[in-house]
Amino acid sequence: MKLFKQPQLSKREKNFNKIGQLHGMIIMILLGAGFIATLGGYAAGSILTVAGTLAIIASFVFGHRRSDEFQKAIQLKAAAISFALMMVILSVTSMLEAYGNFTDYPVTTLFYAGFLLHLLILPHLGKKANEK
Amino acid sequence: MKNNLSKLRAQYKWSQAELGDRLDVSRQTVNAIENGKYDPSLPLAFRIAQLFKQNVEDIFTPED
């Protein structure tokens, strides 16, 4: 029995809600939030994380293979910078964790942070190299 | 490394994208080479020289 009358949603509103749910799920995965604490939930979370990680690696590898020598050079440079920044983040978070200020940060979040850093640094390097 | 790639390209009335297509590289790569932001590999330098029918050292000169 429904206590409240459900509002009639248009197709557009339903689609919007679906997109919202999908975004929420992506953000949850990015933040390393687990699914419901059941074996199935953990399995789903692990599978999605592995799939996401492999997709990111595949996008890098295929992108790298299709690029010419200059693009390859700036991609490697961006990867090196983002890796260095990730190491800095790792050391800071480890230190904070050791002092008990910051706990339960997942490595997955760090990996995605590196991916985002790479995506932010790469166009910057390309633009810089094309400046007069 | 200095180069006169932009002058040569102007002589042939090619755009950066057109030259990139002929060299099988991107327009960004041609632009970066012309601006001296990127030194091409030896195979690419030879492809450029071959395309403009010149020697590599006539196009690329070391900076003092």
Image: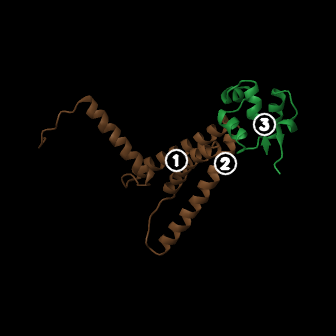
Chain colours: A brown, B green
* Amino acid at circle 3: Asn
State the residue at coordinates (43%, 47%): A44
Q: Position of residue A120 (x, y in %)?
A: 53, 48
User: Eyeballing the image, is A79 above or below B43?
Assistant: below
Q: What element does badge 3 sit on?
A: loop
Mark 3 chain: B
Residue at 70% in and 35% down = B30
Mark 3 in CB contact with mark 1 (< 8 angstroms): no
Instruction: Chain letter for mark 1, please.
Output: A
Residue A7 placement (x, y as % from top left): 16, 36
Q: Quadrant of residue B16?
A: top right
Circle 2 or circle 3, nearest the eye = 3
What's the amino acid at mark 2? Leu
| Residue at the image point whose x is 69% and y is 40% from the top | B32
- For label 1, the residue is A50
Residue assigned mark 3: B4
